[in-house]
Amino acid sequence: MGGMPDCQQMRVDAAGRQLRLLHVHAHPDDESSKGAATTALYVSQGVRVMVATCTGGERGDILNPKMDTPGNQENIAFLRAREMDRAREILGVEQVWLGFVDSGLPEGDPLPPLPDGCFAVQDVNEAAGRLVKVLREFRPHVVTTYDENGGYPHPDHIMTHKITMAAVRDAADPTKWPEHGEPWQVVKVYYHMTFHRRRFEKLDEVLHENGHERVYAERLSRMDDHLTQRLTTFVPCAEYFHVRDDALRAHATQIDPDGFWFAVPLAIQKLGWPTEDYQLVKSMVPVTLPEDDLFAGLDTHFVDRLDTWFYSI
């Protein structure tokens, strides 16, 4: 289980400063279900990785039947924070809470109003200020988040997209949020795109070829191919799928170890689709698509950690 090995080398930019990657996510567990193997890959390269978690997941359901007890339901906020701590340790990342309150996932027809004061009803430009502070303090080269539909239409995911794009814009503007420090220009911004039709089709195909039953027929019947057209970046990270899975299992109230996330054997996943996939939506440097590296286009190299301990960001 868990943990990234000590990295003797560090990946740095042209000025010799440690590369930095920021993932902005809506809830605890999103950092493990989206891009976690990519995270583990970059941590292994000596990249400094931070997760900004917008909400505490307070209104999330308990999705693991073995954990669905009245006591756990009453203590869901505490449990999700503790699970986040464990996942953070497994992935080897830093993590910051932005402090917004989970909006929940409204159901019904018509949909009920969102709860007063929740994340999704905040003013976007005001809410972005908390993330501007993180961006100016952490100073990431690359930021990842969700697309305009939130990856799926959860109000907190959509709001995460909105505040991330606003914060990236405002963090570079010296007239915005001067109380949050010196301006910082993020070099590249990506959307997570791993849950696309082409990947599920390929995994089902490889399952069948290796004597297993297909598991995604029902899901594929509901999917179109629009995300496939948006893919720009395929990060080879199959070597770290097991780290992703350990981080997922750390979120015990959210992830059923006998459920969807582990329906395909790890060997089949590595063989069938060994990448995590993204859409590049903003770049301040020239790029050639498709890419296989979130830092493609930046002038980077590896150095021995002992030779660079004195560099600061």
Image (cartoon, rainbow, N blue to C red):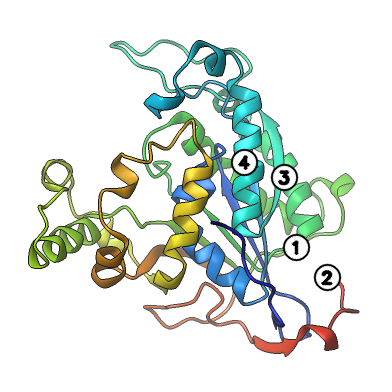
Structural distance between the alpha carbons of marks 1 and 2: 7 Å
User: Which residue is label 4 attached to?
Assistant: 84
Tell which tag, 1 or 4, sits nearer the viewer: 4
The type of residue carrying mark 1 is Arg
Q: Which mark is residue 139?
A: 1
Q: Is residue 312 left or right of residue 40?
A: right
User: Which residue is label 3 attached to?
Assistant: 96
What kind of element bears circle 4? helix
What kind of element bears circle 1? loop
- Vertically, is 233 above or below 211? below
Q: Upstream in the sequence, badge 3 or badge 2? A: 3
The type of residue carrying mark 2 is Ile
User: Which residue is label 2 attached to?
Assistant: 313
Q: Which mark is residue 247?
A: none
Q: Upstream in the sequence, badge 3 or badge 4? A: 4
Do the CB atoms of the residues marked 1 and 2 lie less than 8 Å apart?
Answer: yes
Q: Position of residue 301 (x, y in %)?
A: 66, 89
Structural distance between the alpha carbons of marks 3 and 2: 18 Å
Q: Quadrant of the N terminus?
A: bottom right
User: Residue at 52% of width from left, 50% of height from top?
Assistant: 247
Q: Upstream in the sequence, badge 1 or badge 4? A: 4
Camera-side residue of 74 and 136: 74
Structural distance between the alpha carbons of marks 4 and 2: 26 Å
Do the CB atoms of the residues marked 1 and 3 lie less than 8 Å apart?
Answer: no
Camera-side residue of 114 and 19: 19
